[in-house]
Amino acid sequence: MRGPRPMFFLHLSAAFSAITFSTAVAQSAEPRLLSSCSHCWPLSGVYANSLMAPDGAGGTYVVWVDGSFRWRLQRLGADLSVPEPWPSSGLGLTTERQSSRIYPVLAADGSGGVYVAWAEQATNGDMSAWLLRVRADGRPARGWPNGGVALTGPSPMVTYPALVRSGKGAAVGWVEARNGKALIRLAARDANGRPLAGWPADGVSLQACECSLGDAVLLASDGRAGLFLGWMEMREVLSDLQVAYVSGLGAARTWTLVSRALPPDAIQLESHPEMVADGLGGAIALWADQRGQARVGKDLVDAFAQRMTPTGQDLWTPAAPGHHPIAAGPGYQMNPHVVSDGKGGAYFAWNEHGPFAETSGRAQHLDAQGRAASGWPAGGIALGLEVAGLASDLDDGALAMWTDSSGAHLQRIGSRWSPESGAPASLSLGAPAGRSNVRMASDGRGGAFMAWEERGGVVSPGLGGSSAEGARLKVLIQHLNLESGVASPIVQLPIDQPGIAFAVHPIAPNPAHGPCLLRFDLPAPGPVTIDVFDVAGRRIARLADRQPFGVGSQSVTWDLSDRRGRRVPAGLYLVRVSAGRNQAVVRITVLG
């Protein structure tokens, strides 16, 4: 079993997501109250690089969730001005649907506009996946309704849609609950909002999976009409990574990329597998891998990757499928990230720390054969004490955020750079102090945009603590010119002023041997239902059945028993809290 992280590593993780900038705020707005639920924060998201997208003119699109739990979209120029006729408060949907619109993700449409995908929850609790194409002037593209297009019918659960531009349109993948099972779903639309040729209007179901209803899928385009889709198949201890290739006619080919390798915490966002297009019709998958612990006691967690074709052929180390190490050795090789170089290779970043290893953030560039690119050492290069983010520079290179003892830094690794060329210039971002959910995106011209949250008055999600008094919150964005080293003034994005939000806090202890505590916040008194599901979506226990609770912080205890009073087997479970129109899901791992 994997040991706990050292405390200094936790501190650095929080510190890097809390970057300080020295320039003054150019615009101001009143901050708002917000409770600490994981999907309520404006810049929350599984796919960190999908909350901003380039506009093709040196500017960016950015999407966030406002106080009414509905996404808002804004276009900004390189000087962070709002181009006409975009509203200064950002674009919201024009629709009469009374629903929450959460988990938004973006993808540039290649014509100066952007696709937006999201999950929607109706007032009766039903959920669905949606897609909209927005033009550069802020209006829906021709053929798209103002309120977007529904990709699926009502479902008890839809989580974390993944979005990519595909062929002449866009594709969306997600996990949903249907007839007591967890299903992998995929839908594709053309540039005018119609189903792509051969695709049904409500998408396709690949298969029932042993995956978590709270998990996210991986999605990459082959550059034409085909799609790679990845997901985790949950096992008792170590999980499988499954991949499917779906052709333009919706026909799927499925294979196991690696078996019984992914550790239990791979479902967590910072450790989640990633997948990118390789630029040559294939895809590259990356994951944290715990198999080495059985072979070499000091190899606690390693990082592995594989490049694959649409037929399922492994292009890296084909003699040992799924066994291409990116970072393997003593200690923990944690939080891996990948960015395609567009030529069959990729840039990788990860964090190495003890025991048995020196604490360091690291980066590597592999070519199309999976070998270290020209000039790159076999073990990659050190980037400070920790790398917290990696994004494409839109020119076959990468942008890396990293931290050292002097603070945080942003660095561009160009496609023609190698360590033999000397250290590339990095832009100092100041000392860490109270910022979180930092997001970045290239401007396509050698610079970058960064957006982040500033919070006060409450412990951040996942760190425990009461949120009954809410938090004061700002959402800020800045443009950084990496060539000149000039940072723009900071602009504050407008956000609404709601009251305290419904929230469900992480279960503690987690993992659990015995009774555990679930805490949640209610903005108003009312009945609450709390259900426990296994990874197949089967309800195995009910902890509250429309039980009345008061306003504010509440809690229930689960003794790890199912509805027949028997202790549940070891594994991953989902706990869903429903209070009126509000629902939230948290995860817990039960140990044997």
Image (tube, helix red, strand yellow):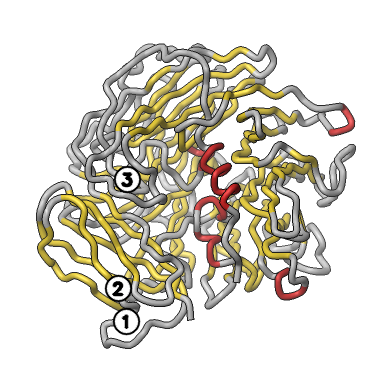
Q: Is residue 171 visible?
A: no
Up-down relation of residue 176 to residue 112 (above or below): below
Tell me where residue 190 appears, x and y as whole percent. 46, 41
Marks 1 and 3 in Cβ contact (< 8 Å):
no
Mark 3: which amino acid? Ser
Residue carrying label 1: 561
The residue at which mark 2 appears reads as 558
Q: Is residue 541 left or right of residue 78?
A: left
Mark 3 residue crowding within 10 angstroms, few (<14) / some (14–19) / many (20+): many
| Relative height, residue 415 to residue 477 (above, below) | below
Residue 366 sits in which quadrant? Answer: top right
Real-space Cα distance between discs 2 and 1? 7 Å
Q: Quadrant of residue 409 in the image?
A: top right
Structural distance between the alpha carbons of marks 3 and 2: 22 Å
The structure residue drawn at horizontal position 70% and vertical position 37%, both measured from the top left corner, is 384
Answer left or right for 364 relative to 547.
right
Residue 204 position, x and y percent, is 44, 60
The amino acid pointed to by label 2 is Trp
- Of 25 and 121, the residue lying toward us: 25
User: Mark 1 or mark 3, which has the lower sequence index?
Assistant: 3
Callout 2 environment at 10 Å: few (<14), some (14 to 19), or many (20+)? some
Residue at point 41%, 34% (across, down):
133
Q: How many marks?
A: 3
Image quadrant of residue 515?
A: bottom left
Q: Is residue 49 left or right of residue 524?
A: right
* Three-letter code for the amino acid on which mark 1 is drawn: Ser
Q: Which residue is mark 3?
A: 36
| Image location (x, y in percent) of residue 187 | 44, 52
